[in-house]
């Protein structure tokens, strides 16, 4: 008979007997019996199907005690921790080869995690890691990163007065910096702080932009094309007038900006100058020896003829200061007009040929460290490190 031909109204047959009980349901070959099922086997349950009574029915689970409550699931909650011995949870005792108890008890359970455990046989003692930071950090974070303990444990040590900073008891949440000396129980911790590596951006300024944040005339400014800083602000290293193009440096560190701009460091600025006409020998010697301008004497360190004829004659000049329109005024004092002026080098930094007008790029961290006189960063993973230059263009804001 097919499935569709089976009668729909089948007689109801009540189940007798309960799983695991001695029910009246026949178990010896009757209509409700199952192959291999003995008397008292469950009819319709999944447990113990065709298996002995003690297999699969969790007959060996802990029985209720006389008061009706079961034994606790965890042995550690029922017995003392010292009774763990070499059991499953006492992994530290097994690692130490069953050594005597460090806590003074007979069970061999280890000390609390806030204590310093001695190394096991053949194991090197763990020493705090030498972690290098660039900015002041919270004390418990620094010590935790050095492997001294967890942050919660270190906070407890601070409250207990076990940690001092510069000879004074430390406070919870206190920050430490490069000049601070941190001691735990009188022992100096090897915490190292490195100077923050500034960011230096090379920008190829085109003509028609002003090096100022606010301009009453509303002219385009170079700061509109620079990337946005999360912290701090951009400082322009020197200035270029409205009609001058070329290399312009921006840094986010005032000390580095002062080092690059102050006259005592005597960093050369090199310009490519196109003039209408040509310099004679007397004019060349005068510009190299020095001439008097309205704001003081001025001279070129070097003056090289770059070739060209007529109105397209170029010169390469260098000087160690950056007064307002100084190069233009020096040529004008000789009766010559500058038709184009472009800065091609600032100190050791040369304008890259790949950097087109209106584009900028970051200096690599290694180059910045050389420029600022800082030690090279230690960054094994290379994460977040500026390792390659990539010219970029930013839409003016």
Image (cartoon, rainbow, N blue to C red):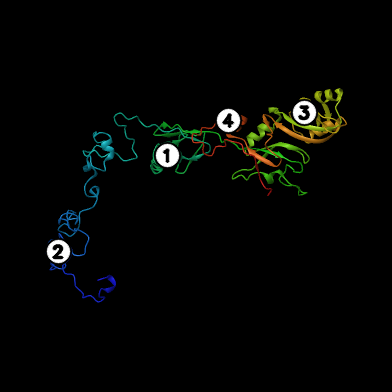
Q: Position of residue 288 (x, y in %)?
A: 80, 24
Q: Residue at x 54, y 39 (%)?
A: 384
Residue 21, label in figure: 2
Quarter placement of the N terminus: bottom left
Mark closer to the chain start, 3 or 2: 2
Characterize the local packing of mark 4: few (<14), some (14-19) or many (20 or more) Cα atoms within 10 angstroms.
Answer: some
Q: Nearer the viewer, residue 123 or 296?
A: 123
Q: Quadrant of residue 284?
A: top right
Determine contact: label 4, label 3, CB under 8 Å: no
Mark closer to the chain start, 2 or 1: 2
Q: To which residue does mark 4 refer?
A: 374
- 269 lies left or right of 310: left
Does 56 sit above or below residue 344? below
Q: To which residue does mark 3 refer?
A: 317
**Foreground label between 1 and 3:** 3
Q: Nearer the viewer, residue 12 or 144?
A: 12
Q: Secondary structure at mark 4?
A: loop
Mark closer to the chain start, 1 or 3: 1
Q: To which residue does mark 1 refer?
A: 144
Q: Quadrant of residue 228?
A: top right
**Foreground label between 2 and 1:** 2
Q: Residue at x 39, y 44 (%)?
A: 152
Q: Secondary structure at mark 2?
A: loop
């Amino acid at each position: 008979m097919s499935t569709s031909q089976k009668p729909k109204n089948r007689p109801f047959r009540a189940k007798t007997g309960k799983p695991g009980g001695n029910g009246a349901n026949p178990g010896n070959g009757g209509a409700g019996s199952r192959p291999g099922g003995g008397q008292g086997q469950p009819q319709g349950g999944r447990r113990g199907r065709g298996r002995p009574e003690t297999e699969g029915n969790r007959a060996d689970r802990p029985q209720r005690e006389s008061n009706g409550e079961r034994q606790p699931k965890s042995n550690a909650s029922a017995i003392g921790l010292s009774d763990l011995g070499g059991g499953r949870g006492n992994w530290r005792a097994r690692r130490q080869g069953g050594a005597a108890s460090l806590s003074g008890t007979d069970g061999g359970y280890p000390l609390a995690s806030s204590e310093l455990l001695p190394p096991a046989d053949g194991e090197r003692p763990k020493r705090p890691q030498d972690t290098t930071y660039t900015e002041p950090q919270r004390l418990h974070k620094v010590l935790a990163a050095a492997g001294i303990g967890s942050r919660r444990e270190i906070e407890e040590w601070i409250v207990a007065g076990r940690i001092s900073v510069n000879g004074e008891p430390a406070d919870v949440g206190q920050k430490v910096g490069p000049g601070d000396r941190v001691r735990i129980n009188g022992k100096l911790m090897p915490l190292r702080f490195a100077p923050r590596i500034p960011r230096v951006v090379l920008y190829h300024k085109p003509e028609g932009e002003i090096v100022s944040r606010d301009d009453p005339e509303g002219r385009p400014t170079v700061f509109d094309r620079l990337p946005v800083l999360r912290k701090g602000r951009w400082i322009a290293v020197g200035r270029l007038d409205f009609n001058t193009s070329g290399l312009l440096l921006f840094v986010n560190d005032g000390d580095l900006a002062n080092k690059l701009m102050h006259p005592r460091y005597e960093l050369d600025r090199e310009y490519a100058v196109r003039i209408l006409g040509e310099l004679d020998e007397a004019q060349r010697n005068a510009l190299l020896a020095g001439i008097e301008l309205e704001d003081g004497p001025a001279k070129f360190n070097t003056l090289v003829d770059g070739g060209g004829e007529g109105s397209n004659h170029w010169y390469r000049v260098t000087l160690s200061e950056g007064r307002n329109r100084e190069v233009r005024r020096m040529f004008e004092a000789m009766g010559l007009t500058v038709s184009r002026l472009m800065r091609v080098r600032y100190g050791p930094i040369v304008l890259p040929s790949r950097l087109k007008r209106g584009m900028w790029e970051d200096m690599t961290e290694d180059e910045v460290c050389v420029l600022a006189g800082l030690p090279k960063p230690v960054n094994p993973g290379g994460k977040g490190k500026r390792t390659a230059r990539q010219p970029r263009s930013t839409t003016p804001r």
